[in-house]
């Protein structure tokens, strides 16, 4: 079968790899119907050292079950399923606590001999715990929004949820990428009375307004912090959702959070330290967030997607065939595309 292999910065290829086979009784084989490129895939695309053998990549996909191991129940050949971006048994103590990203028997796609999502098929370990059955056909118009349940939308939702967004909170979202826009949609879903979106790409912030942003701040750094403070009577917002992962973004988050408020971060951090000095101490705000246990949120969010209450798949603005996946990476890296859907 064909699958995407990254060989280094700017070097993504589609190559022939061995067809996946059932190896464990808890496995399923899934034929991929649609996959996508994540903002986090761009970190290796920008910085990975050249590698002769390369590495599989991709962790978001929807597909059809082709076969299951003898210990998999509740899933049968022909079922359409969505895979969260971490596989897990969904039964261990961490999974029971809703933290499937810390599963004792789980792991990441495209690592340690596990297939990546950007290919024609995937061997899914812990299939019964990992995969969620979708009650639609593979040509459903809902597919982009259902695919967003793999990662991008639950990641935005995790940010809003861990921040404790409610109807009585004001919110700033930092970043107008697909995760930031998903965080706007999530804050709106949780009833936030005001959502200030910090972003400078008008086509993206326009989608943010459609998703529920009440204000847009295009300025960055100190200027952006000042603008948000002006909009909030000088105090900042109760909740700040940091959806970028760069040091500037977390510093901006600390600048716009209201004293006693919460900063949640879901942008994969490209920094190792955050300011935690005496000045920050005096302000009594909380820092939370982290990698999103997408599996924990899918059941809750799926119904809203199925009945059309929300349309998180609007973040997809380009579709490429698997053979052209390299063009998809380039478009996202050049910011000519917000998020790219890949069809094998
Ligand atoms: Zn587990």
Image: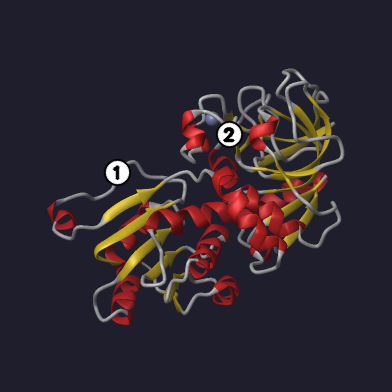
- Which image quadrant for residue 21? top right
Estimate the x, y position of residue 196 in percent, counting from the top left.
Answer: 42, 74
Q: Is residue 55 left or right of residue 219?
A: right
Seen in the picture, residue 50 relative to 327 is either above or below; the reply is above
- Report the residue marked by disc 1: 273
Indicate which label's residue lies in the foreground, 1 or 2: 2
| Numbered circle sitting on residue 90 | 2
Cα–Cα gap, marks 1 and 2: 32 Å
Q: Foreground residue, 335 or 145?
A: 145
Estimate the x, y position of residue 165 in percent, counting from the top left.
Answer: 41, 63
Q: Is mark 2 within 8 Å of ligand 1?
A: yes
Residue drawn at (56%, 52%) of the image: 154
| Numbered circle sitting on residue 324 | none
Q: Is mark 1 within 8 Å of ligand 1?
A: no
Q: Foreground residue, 241 or 69?
A: 69
Q: Is residue 337 visible?
A: no
Q: Is residue 85 left or right of residue 270?
A: right
Within the displayed image, which quadrant is ligand 1 positioned in? Answer: top right
Q: Secondary structure at mark 2?
A: loop
Quarter of the picture containing the C terminus is top right
Residue drawn at (33%, 62%) of the image: 252
Residue drawn at (19%, 58%) of the image: 284
Seen in the picture, residue 144 relative to 228 is either above or below; the reply is above
């Amino acid at each position: 079968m064909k699958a995407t292999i990254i060989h280094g910065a700017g070097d993504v290829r589609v190559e022939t790899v061995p067809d996946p086979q059932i190896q464990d009784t808890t496995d399923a084989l899934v034929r991929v119907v649609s996959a996508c490129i994540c903002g986090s895939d761009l970190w290796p695309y920008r910085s990975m050292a050249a590698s002769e053998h390369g590495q599989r990549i991709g962790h978001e996909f929807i597909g059809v079950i082709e076969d299951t191991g003898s210990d998999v129940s509740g899933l049968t050949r022909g079922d359409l399923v969505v895979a969260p971006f971490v596989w897990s048994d969904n039964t261990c103590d961490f999974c029971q606590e809703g933290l499937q990203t810390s599963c004792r028997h789980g792991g990441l796609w495209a690592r340690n001999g596990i297939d990546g999502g950007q290919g024609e098929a995937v061997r899914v370990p812990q299939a019964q715990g990992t995969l969620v059955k979708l009650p639609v056909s593979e040509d459903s118009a809902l597919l982009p929004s259902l695919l967003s349940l793999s990662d991008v939308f639950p990641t935005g939702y995790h940010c809003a949820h861990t921040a404790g967004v409610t109807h009585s909170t004001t919110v700033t979202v930092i970043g107008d990428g697909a995760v930031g826009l998903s965080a706007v949609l999530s804050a709106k879903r949780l009833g936030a009375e005001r959502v200030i979106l910090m972003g400078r790409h008008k086509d993206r912030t326009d989608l943010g307004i459609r998703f529920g942003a009440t204000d847009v701040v295009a300025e960055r750094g100190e200027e952006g912090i000042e603008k948000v403070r002006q909009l909030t009577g000088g105090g900042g917002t109760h909740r700040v959702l940091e959806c970028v992962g760069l040091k500037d973004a977390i510093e901006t988050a600390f600048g716009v959070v209201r004293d006693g408020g919460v900063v949640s971060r879901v942008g994969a951090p490209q920094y190792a330290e955050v300011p935690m000095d005496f000045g920050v101490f005096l302000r009594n705000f909380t820092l939370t967030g982290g990698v999103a246990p997408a599996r924990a949120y899918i059941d809750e969010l799926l119904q809203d997607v199925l009945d059309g209450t929300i349309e998180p798949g609007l973040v997809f603005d380009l579709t490429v065939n698997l053979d052209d996946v390299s063009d998809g990476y380039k478009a996202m890296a050049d910011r000519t595309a917000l998020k790219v859907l890949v069809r094998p």
